[in-house]
Image (tube, rainbow, N blue to C red):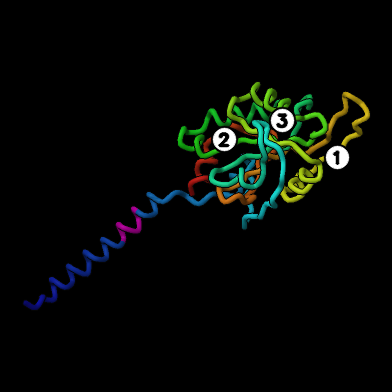
């Protein structure tokens, strides 16, 4: 049966209303786009495109080898420090512990925190494992050959100065940012110190699950 002009008008109007409602629902239900300015204020810097990470052959604090394969399959936060550090390292590790504790359980399970030593001369796997236990039992650590460390640090824009190891109490100057690595093992951004655990705990789940 042919539709009358009025019926056609009603159907077209209903279809238009349905499209508008659908657009509104989609806009409301879709997560807001990450605001780079707000991220920056919270100390988060994301790159426009992910950057590659080279293969490295280092040692895990838990025993065995450590390399790029350990950065695959989960989100990672990498902090380059050392166990004899008197200030920024224990502060940052404590902030990372606070951050992980503030995350929703599902996000915390997707995230791994690893401390990479810039002092492989003193930081043996055993020394690192003991140090990491002061902060959180499941924090990871990596140490090893200075050349492998330098290759990884260059790729992640980490600056440090190789120390004069002739003194037992030498210090190592190093940058304090925390590197963000995605589950594909790519360098996607960094967290600027000092960390803001409460703010970061609100943003990281949205970065990890956009």
Region of the chain picked out in magenta, as a range = 20-25
Label 3, on which residue? 125
Helix, strand, or loop for circle 2? helix
Q: Nearer the viewer, mark 2 or mark 1?
A: 1
Q: Residue furthest front?
A: 64
Quarter of the image with the N terminus is bottom left
Helix, strand, or loop for circle 1? loop
Residue 128 in percent (x, y) is at 71, 28
In the depicted view, which residue is nearer to us: 200 or 63? Answer: 63
Query: Contact, CB < 8 Å: mark 2 with mark 1?
Result: no
Q: Which mark is residue 199?
A: 2
Q: Which mark is residue 188?
A: none
> In this rendering, would 25 be left or right of 210?
left
Q: Nearer the viewer, mark 3 or mark 2?
A: 3
Instruction: Quote the CA–CA distance across marks 2 and 1.
Output: 31 Å
In the depicted view, which residue is nearer to us: 81 or 62? Answer: 62
Assess whether residue 22 is covered by the magenta stretch.
Answer: yes
Q: Residue furthest left?
A: 1
For image coordinates 54% across by 28% down, the residue present is 101
For image coordinates 88% across by 28% down, the residue present is 170
For residue 180, what is the image quadrant? top right
Looking at the magenta stretch, what is its main secondary structure?
A: helix
Instruction: Quote the CA–CA distance across marks 1 and 3.
Output: 21 Å
Q: Residue furthest right?
A: 166
Label 1, on which residue? 161
Residue 150 in percent (x, y) is at 79, 45
> In this rendering, would 21 be left or right of 126?
left
Residue 200 in percent (x, y) is at 57, 37
Instruction: Quote the CA–CA distance across marks 3 and 2.
Output: 32 Å
Q: Residues within 10 Å of mark 1 (few under 14, many from 20)?
A: few
């Amino acid at each position: 049966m042919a539709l009358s002009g009025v019926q056609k008008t009603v159907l077209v109007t209903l279809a238009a209303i349905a499209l508008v409602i659908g657009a509104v629902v989609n806009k409301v239900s879709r997560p807001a786009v990450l605001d780079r300015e707000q991220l920056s204020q919270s100390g988060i810097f994301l790159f426009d495109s992910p950057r590659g990470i080279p293969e490295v052959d280092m040692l895990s604090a838990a025993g065995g080898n450590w390399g790029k394969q350990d950065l695959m399959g989960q989100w990672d936060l990498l902090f380059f420090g050392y166990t004899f550090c008197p200030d920024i390292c224990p502060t940052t590790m404590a902030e990372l512990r606070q951050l992980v504790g503030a995350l929703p359980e599902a996000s915390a399970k997707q995230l791994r925190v690893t401390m990479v030593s810039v002092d492989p001369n003193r930081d043996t796997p055993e020394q690192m494992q003991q140090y990491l236990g002061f902060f959180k039992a499941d924090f990871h650590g990596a140490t090893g050959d200075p050349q492998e460390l330098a290759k990884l640090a260059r790729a992640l824009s980490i600056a440090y100065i190789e120390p004069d190891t002739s003194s037992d109490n030498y210090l190592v100057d190093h940058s304090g940012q925390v590197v963000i690595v995605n589950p594909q093992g790519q360098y996607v951004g960094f967290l600027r110190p000092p960390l803001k655990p409460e703010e970061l705990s609100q943003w990281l789940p949205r970065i990890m699950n956009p």
